[in-house]
Image (tube, helix red, strand yellow):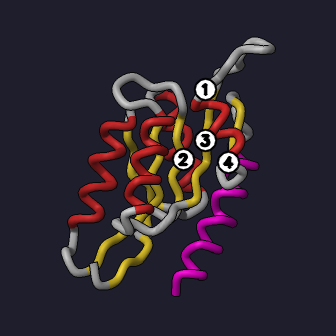
Amino acid sequence: METQKYSNRILIVEDDDAIRRVLSTGARINRLEADLAEDGLKAKEFISNLMAQDPKEGQSYPIILTDLRMPGMNGIELLNYVGEQVGAKQILKPEIFVLSGYIPNKGTKLGKFEEVLELGEHRYHQKPVDIINLFSAIKKEYTRVVQSSK
């Protein structure tokens, strides 16, 4: 790809329809356009479609907000896919916001989940999430990412 740029949209990935609607409303209130995916497979499709819009000029989501535990392709698998695309220079690196209601028992080995938490670049938010604080952080990062790419 000759040039890459960030899309004017964010990607919200959440399997719970009610939560997905709340997150969509939060995006709209903050003047952010959002694509909504019910699982990682649909999110992967959105990412692929965005990359393919113009073969000479790739686009990337500046923000991906994802749940971790979803059917089909879960949030960990989605983050791995995004990482592969960034590594292959197919997309620009998005800022990742992770949502989860999953609370592991003390001493439980978490595997890939631990990896997500150890990657300081991801912002982890426990459900139920404070929508106002979440979208304040998202809006701030969206502005920073988009402005830094100009």
Residue 142 counted in the magenta span:
yes
Assess whether mark 3 and mark 1 are in contact (beta carbons under 8 angstroms).
Answer: no
Disc 1 designates what residue?
111
Q: Is residue 136 above or below residue 92?
A: above
Assess whether mark 4 and mark 1 are in contact (beta carbons under 8 angstroms).
Answer: no
Q: CA distance from mark 2 to mark 3?
A: 6 Å
Q: CA distance from mark 1 to mark 4?
A: 13 Å
Disc 2 designates what residue?
65
> For this view, does 2 lie left or right of residue 60?
left
> For this view, does 68 lie left or right of residue 39?
right
Q: Earlier in the sequence, mark 1 or mark 4?
A: 1
Disc 4 designates what residue?
119
Find residue 31 and report its image quarter: bottom right
Q: Earlier in the sequence, mark 2 or mark 3?
A: 2
Badge 3: how crowded within 10 Å, few (<14), some, or many (20+)? many
Kindly identify the residue that appears in the image at 19 percent across and 74 percent down: 55
Badge 2: how crowded within 10 Å, few (<14), some, or many (20+)? many
Q: Is residue 108 above or below residue 100?
A: above
Find residue 103 and report its image quarter: top right
Name the magenta segment's main secondary structure.
helix
Disc 3 designates what residue?
98
Q: CA distance from mark 1 to mark 3?
A: 16 Å
Q: Is residue 146 above or below residue 15?
A: below
> For this view, does 22 lie left or right of residue 8?
right
Frontmost of labels 1 and 3 is 1
User: What residue type is disc 2 on?
Assistant: Leu
Residue 82 picture location, percent across and down = 43, 52
Magenta region: which residues? Answer: 132-150
User: What residue type is disc 4 on?
Assistant: Leu
Kindly identify the residue that appears in the image at 47 percent across and 58 percent down: 10
